[in-house]
Amino acid sequence: MNLISNESLQPFDFILFGGTGDLSIRKLIPALYFRHCEKQLPDDGRIIASGRTAMDTAEFRAKLDVEVREHISEQDFEEEAWQAFLERIQYYAVDVNDVAAYQPLVDALKGREDHVRVFYLSVAPSLFTQITNGVHEAGLITANSRVALEKPLGRDEKSAEEINDRLSDVFSEEQIYRIDHYLGKETVQNLLALRFGNAFFEPLWRAEHISDVQITIAESLGVDSRGAFYDQTGALRDMVQNHLLQLLVILAMEPPVSMDPDAVRDEKIKVLRALKPLTGIDAIENSVRGQYKAGAYKDGPVPGYLDNADIPDDSTTETFVALRAEIASWRWAGVPFFLRTGKRLESKTTEIVINFKKIPHSIFPTADGFSIPNQLIIRLQPEESIRMRIYVKAWGDDIELQPVHLNLDFNDVFQKRKMIAYERLLLDIIRGNPTLFMRRDEVAAAWAWIDPIQEAWEQYQYSPKSYTAGTWGPGAANALISKDGLRWHED
Ligand code: BG6
């Protein structure tokens, strides 16, 4: 895989549907701007944004000039580079439901058929098919074209397959880039580097030595303006089906034979298929649903989920999920994988915690009785770091052991700006490297594991437990993990 590639890009047209939307302003345009600053975009690389709002290119650039600035820190903002970057951008208002309305794009792309062409759909999934059909009927799809889609890809296996069928009517599988932005995060790729670039982790990376794995994606933000979307989705579909499962498979997969895109994705899918199905009462016993109620952070009080005007008073959508999963394979048999995600939790923390088994026999006294054995903590957020908990002899005369942490904070080591996950992903799409994108069978396999959990919740009318905003979720999540005699890692 291209973990870091300075390979120069071919001239391209990046056609951004949903160009005026939140994701474009907060992430996509800033990501491209940073790559422009790093001189990774070729001179002939254009961004052709479109949206429903009628405006011309000058007005769109003026809008970006105000709005995008807010999402780039002052120290990373270079006025001259920004002005040069804006020159790459054009804007056309397109009603995506009207085939005739694609004409401005046809004109803008005429004569550039040999260039790489990316159709980036940063729009509601209900518009995916209209747009792919629209660009097809407008004759815009060339051999060098790609289409990139944001999640959610469907709401279950069946609807995801329907979307994939429609996509495959006009694009080949090699042209389709399904994005999970977690795969663009530096530490996720570092997980691969850590596992397969070092001699001492891989021999220990198995049931014989690992007691349990905990993966947490905690957010302190609430649902806020996304209420209507979120209430139809819930945390299982919004976070577990994609981000959490992607972290799990990268952590658990067998070493691929090479970094070739399909070699990696073939190994990932084996993990998804090896996940023990959670169905019926088994799903209920191994899962916890939660929904936040009003609470407070140090900045002040925050409303509960049901206080949101876009959410029905009797909504039973979960804003928190905890699961106990197992992977039925030689490597992982018997190791519980605890997954947890939620909105309005105590802090924004994403981390993977690998707890190793206790040493078989202790010849040393310890201050804590080896209460927590060796532990590897891989953090994605708030900081990107790797921490290893080991025992050393306590300073002084006594031969007593004491736990300490070996810390590797990527910020200190590399002293570089924290990259936006999209920077790598957008360049990979332009470059034509699909390693960090989900293949169709991978999406289907992830849904195939998720669907029975959702069905069991409905069948057993398993309502979410409420938890106070600003805490670590419902007490039932602690009860779930304590059945194995364990506790969630929190510090
Ligand atoms: C998105 C979810 O995919 O990921 C959001 O739809 C969530 O609900 C977001 O807030 C979290 O991403 P990150 O990179 O901020 O952890």
Image (spheres, grey):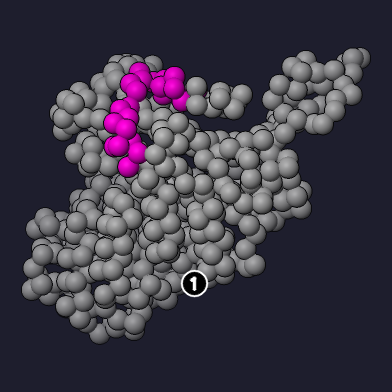
Q: Is residue 408 left or right of residue 222?
A: right
Give x and y (percent) for residue 474.
Answer: 41, 22
Give x and y (percent) for residue 283.
Answer: 42, 37
Between 375 and 324, the residue placed more toward the observer is 324
| Residue at mark 1 | 8
What residue do we see at 56% from left, 23% from top?
482
Q: Which of the 4 quarters of the picture holds residue 483?
A: top right
The image shows residue 10, relative to residue 195, as above or below, that is below
State the extent of the magenta-drawn residues as a range.
Answer: 455-478
The image shows residue 255, relative to residue 311, as above or below, that is below
Q: Which of the 4 quarters of the picture holds residue 471?
A: top left
Give x and y (percent) for residue 334.
Answer: 63, 40
Locate the N terminus and report the quarter of the image it occupies: bottom right
Give x and y (percent) for residue 378.
Answer: 59, 39
The image shows residue 186, relative to residue 313, as above or below, that is below
Q: Residue furthest right?
A: 397
Q: Is 284 inside the magenta-drawn segment?
A: no
Looking at the rendered structure, the secondary structure element under dot 1 is loop
What residue do we see at 28% from left, 54% from top?
154
Locate the C terminus and report the quarter of the image it occupies: top right
Q: Which of the 4 quarters of the picture holds residue 112?
A: bottom left
What residue do we see at 10% from left, 65% from top?
97
The image shows residue 461, relative to residue 31, as above or below, that is above
Q: Is 473 inside the magenta-drawn segment?
A: yes
